[in-house]
Image: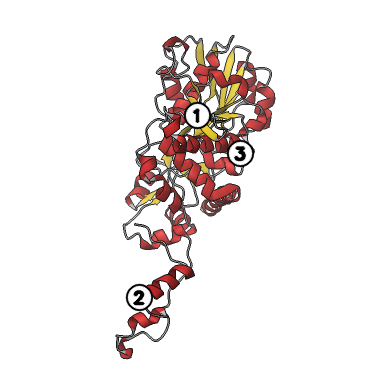
Amino acid sequence: MSYISHNGEDLGRILAAIGIERPDEVFSTIPPALLCGAGLAVEGPKDEESLRRELDFRPSRVVFAGGGIYRHHIPAAVDALASRQEFVTAYTPYQPEISQGTLQAIFEYQSMMAGLTGMEVSNASMYDGATALAEAALMALRIKGIRRVAVTRAMQPSYRSVLRTYLAHAEVDGIVEIPFDPVTGQTDLDALEKSAGPDTAFFIQSPNYFGVIEPMEQVARVVSGRAGFWGVAVTEALSLGVLKAPGEYGPDVVLGEAQSFGNPAGAGGPLLGFFCTRKEHVRRMPGRVVGLTKDREGSQAFCLTLSTREQHIRREKATSNICTNQGLCALRAAIYLSAMGPEGLKRTALQCAAGARFLMGLLKEKGIAPVFSAPVFHEFAIPMDEDKLKELKSAGIVPGVPVSRQYPEIPGSVLVTVTEMNTQEECRCLATNM
């Protein structure tokens, strides 16, 4: 059980109950010669993460892996609250009269995600970012006139793979991949302009898979009024704490992965896909939406406002067969965002960005430059051959995620990720061994 300190009032009640006035009277039976006469040299105070590192005696690796799933600090409050039995054992909230707590948790999550993305509506029903992208493409195809789907090649490879699976038997003319500039790592705007059309649904990721921040204002100018539907994917939700809200560029949908909000990396899951859109598309949106209303006595109440899954309505009218609301993961995200607050989220995002630039500076001193020249958030690709990769792993250092397996046009590269979990000592450790 987590330790919770007592305050002065608690201490007074304890002393009164056992009949003494001062805490040191508890030790009155111990001979003075055996008592420590001076105060203990206890360091502190320390933040949660520093204390965890000090108390964790397990040997750990130096890890710079990311590429879509990220290690971030999770406040103790997240585990403490999310592990309460009323949340852990709660089932899908079909009966609002006995599910107000669960419904409110989802409502708060939706509200925060809509605010962070700059969109009007959010659901809580995506398995992960990859299925959120695929569902967004299917939603676009329900709009009259959309026949093609275009994505940037700099989009997360697993997202593009899931998208191809989802659309394998859909009524779509094809999936087009927009190339990226081999120098900057950003989307080729000329190729985008040639591909975008009123029959096209276009999706871009920013920061993209290489960690590069896309020129979203220019992208928006190209596709707004040209593409029939377009959306932004965000695989690193923490970037929303410092970058301009994607909704401000005018997309139809903003989707992605919110695992970074209070959910551990684990062994690759569970993940938390988010899906935000404009009100005009809400009835085409997959999943379900929790809304705020009033009961017959006029009191505040929460309920499932929209629920267009095939188990709720006729299959031919359903927008999705997604059968979960990822409620516990969404709850953890809501607690995390509440605990961090806007300023805490921003400071954490800036810490990640500063850490990446600190490591880039160390590598530059060794003559190692990023593969791409465009600005990044907290990830960047560097050249690294297989031998060096194996050597570092043998030394207990995971330098990042190999890129060449998904992108043969970028041979011998590794995607390095720096979060607030990586100390300056770890950065120096990696740079020294390069």
Please, what secondary structure does the residue beneath circle 3 have? loop
Please, what secondary structure does the residue beneath circle 2 have? helix
Amino acid under disc 2: Ile
Which labelled disc corresponds to residue 303?
1
Can you tell which of label 2 and label 3 is closer to the viewer? 2
Q: Nearer the viewer, residue 173 or 83?
A: 83
Can you tell which of label 3 and label 1 is closer to the viewer? 1
175 over 214 or under it: above or below: above
Residue 271 sits in which quadrant?
Answer: top left
Residue 170 sits in which quadrant?
Answer: top left
Using the numbered discs, state the Cα–Cα distance from disc 3 to disc 1 in whole angstroms: 45 Å
Which residue is pictured at 49% across the width and 49% down the height? 419
Using the numbered discs, state the Cα–Cα distance from disc 2 to disc 3 in whole angstroms: 67 Å
Q: Residues within 10 Å of mark 2 (few under 14, many from 20)?
A: few
Q: Nearer the viewer, residue 337 or 411?
A: 337
Q: Are marks 2 and 3 in contact (CB under 8 Å)?
A: no
Which residue is pictured at 30% across the width and 85% down the height? 30
Which badge, 2 or 3, is on the more N-terminal residue? 2
Name the residue beneath numbered marker 2. Answer: 18
Q: Nearer the viewer, residue 374 or 76?
A: 76
Name the residue beneath numbered marker 3. Answer: 374
Which residue is pictured at 41% across the width and 38% down the height? 328
Which badge, 2 or 1, is on the more N-terminal residue? 2
Coordinates of residue 425 in the picture (x, y in percent): 46, 59
Coordinates of residue 55 in the picture (x, y in percent): 36, 62
Amino acid under disc 3: Ala
179 over 411 or under it: above or below: above
Coordinates of residue 368 in the picture (x, y in percent): 51, 48
Residue 414 visible here: no
